[in-house]
Image: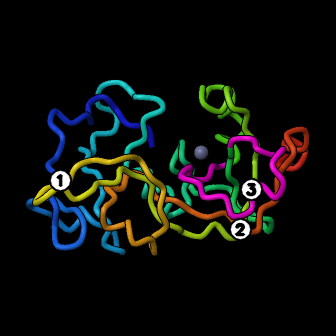
Amino acid sequence: MTAWTGEDRRTAPVVIRKANGIGYPHENPHDRDTVGVLWARRPLRQGAGRPRYGHVHPQRQRRAMHRLLCQICAMPAYEDEHGTLFLLEDHRNVPGWPEDEVTAHPPLCLRCAAMSPRWCPHLRRTGAVAVQVKHPDIDGVHGLRYQPDGPLAVPDKPVTVPYDDPAVPWVLAAHLTRVLRGCTVVEPEEFAARFTP
Ligand SMILES: [Zn+2]
């Protein structure tokens, strides 16, 4: 899912105002998802140059999230009767968390989940906890919201919106999100015992 330096764009694509929302001057069928939301364009050259850890490639993120593939190795994520395995920033101090949490982080396979806090700087800093989710439903997108400015569209701010939000035609999507329902938190000290046969 990580973006590579060989996938950087030399020039940003032009985003224009259309009848109700944003678009590209010349769109191809891959520019929009099945709901009709516009997606950020990025060349697909995985392995070209150096990996840009912490930078997510929009199309690979969308594929992993849509198909519930491991965000690191792209194999099917771990799943059993308790649900699909996600790794989330640890907010166990918040009552009710993580039920109904919206996440842009695809799930993981067991092997990558066991390893990832060790080398992912973001997770090491914030603390991570494994959560199994019975109903991780596709919810919407995270991306950059534009606003109309005469005949043009200008960037406003990053947003996370569900697909039924009236603002979604104005968002240039970079991540697909899921809402997590039916969650079971795996306490860190139980992780090894629980997932070792
Ligand atoms: Zn994996």
How crowded is the residue under tag 1: few (<14 C-alpha within 10 Å), some, or many (20+)?
some
Q: CA distance from mark 3 to mark 2?
A: 8 Å
Decide whether the magenta segment is chiefly helix, strand or loop: loop
> Which amino acid is tagged 3?
Pro
Q: Is residue 142 magenta?
A: no
Quarter of the image holding residue 112?
A: top right
Q: Is residue 192 above or below residue 58?
A: above
How crowded is the residue under tag 3: few (<14 C-alpha within 10 Å), some, or many (20+)?
many
| Callout 3 secondary element | loop
Q: Which residue is mark 3?
A: 98
Q: Is residue 134 above or below residue 132?
A: below
Number of marks: 3
Quarter of the image holding residue 98?
A: bottom right
Of mark 3 and mark 2, the one earlier in the sequence is 3
Residue 59, which numbered label? none
Looking at this view, is 14 or 31 the one in front? 14
Residue 59 appears in the figure: no
Residue 138 percent coordinates (x, y) = 53, 68
Looking at this view, is 181 or 191 the one in front? 181
Q: Is mark 2 within 8 Å of ligand 1?
A: no
Q: Nearer the viewer, mark 2 or mark 1?
A: 1
Q: Which residue is mark 1?
A: 15
Q: In the picture provided, is 119 more to the left or to the right than 60?
A: right
Q: Taking the image as four quarters, which one is ligand 1 found in?
A: top right
Which residue is most to the front?
150
> Which span of residues is magenta-colored?
89-109
Q: CA distance from mark 3 to mark 1?
A: 35 Å
Q: Which residue is mark 2?
A: 181
Q: Is the residue under label 1 in contact with that under label 2 (CB below 8 Å)?
A: no
The residue at the point 18 percent across, 55 percent down is 149
Q: In the picture provided, is 182 more to the left or to the right than 72?
A: right
